[in-house]
Image (cartoon, helix red, strand yellow):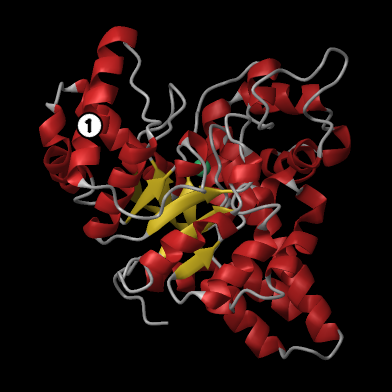
Amino acid sequence: MESLTAAIEELPLTDHHVHTVLPGPLTRPEFEAFITESDAPAPAGTTSFDSQLGFAIRRWCSPVLGLEPAAATADAYVLHRNRRPQEAAAAMLRAAGCGRLLVDTGFIAPGSLGLDELGSLSGAAVSEVVRLETVAAELAGTGCPAAEFARRYRELLGVRSAEAVGLKSIMAYRYGLDFDPRPPSPREVTEAAGRWLREIETSGVIRLSDPVLLREVLWAGVERGLPIQFHTGFGDPELDLRRSDPLLLRGFLDATATAGVPVMLLHCYPFHRHAAFLAQAYPHVYLDLGMVVTYTGARVAAVLAETLELAPFAKVLYSSDAYGLPELVYLGARLWRKAVAEVFGDWIARGEWQEQDAVRVAGLMSAGNAARVYQFPGASI
Ligand SMILES: [Zn+2]
């Protein structure tokens, strides 16, 4: 299957959900905090490196930096990448081979690269994905009167997303995907905005978690008309995983079936089979495996194969969901290419698939589907 592997290696990827990264050195505990979704350090006497993700970093990122994987203990790896952290970051970003990065700017680690710097270091075209809840927080910070919330939010969203290619909802984090799928009434919005703005005045904390306002900003996003990405499935413990199953979006998907807005289900794991069903059932639904590509390490091919049991091939996209570590941008791409080659190679070897079909589908999932859905210039597939 050498020709298949070679063809997949050469595909320029579109990473359609990624965050910007830190170019500087990191202490071992700082580095470890970026390779777990837990908000607590690993228990005493243990390390986050003892995981699929930790092993995959040592195995696949070391050679990019000229370090033998066999010699790359966790300490040796962190020490080595910290010797010339900028160069290490550039090497990782380049080696990922991404033609495009769609960057979620709603969550940025302090000290991260700006989008222009990320573009020049990676050699990729960079576009922005705007978080709906972040725009609401910005509006609340300006002291908007409650009765004007709905109008001013749409105005500000228009400005913030003028150059964006997509929007993102973190409803799963702030409430759960079992939200009332209908748009709230104007009166409900004004009342909820009043409550939220008063709460901000007393607490000094701006964090949108009111279900009425979360629905309001989501529907304003639908009106805006760009593809909407949803966090679903696996994430940090702020999330109730039981309420992040994409099947819970059923009412919203019915309500938006004719809105002309693609819905992108991110990560999905362990509900990737549920998401695959939704992608088959609804013409406007797409999915990716996001950070699961890096987090499942040596097992990602199994998760990809399960996803492709039902998901139409035109509905699956690639993303790394890298955050903080440049290593994760590379590792996502490395493991994705490997998993696609392994899964498709197996189906070809068993006489189920033709190689030319496998190469075409790999191209769709790696960049073609993203080009079509986000309407990049020149998209012809
Ligand atoms: Zn993300």
Q: Residue at x 35, y 61 (%)?
A: 227
Amino acid type, mark 1: Glu
Q: Please tell me which residue lies in front, 190 or 23.
A: 190
Q: Determine if residue 193 is in view.
A: yes
Query: Quadrant location of residue 208?
Result: top left
| Residue 316 drawn at (x, y percent) | 56, 69
Q: Is label 1 within 8 A of ligand 1 (CB to nearest ligand atom)?
A: no
Q: Disc 1 designates what residue?
A: 191
Q: Quadrant of the C terminus?
A: bottom left
Q: Please tell me which residue lies in front, 3 or 126.
A: 126
Q: Quadrant of the N terminus?
A: bottom right
The answer to whether 325 is drawn above or below residue 317 in the figure is: above
Q: Residue at x 53, y 45 (%)?
A: 93
Q: Residues within 10 Å of mark 1 (few under 14, many from 20)?
A: some
Query: Quadrant location of residue 276?
Result: bottom right
Query: Quadrant location of residue 326?
Result: top right
The answer to whether 106 is drawn above or below residue 331 in the figure is: above
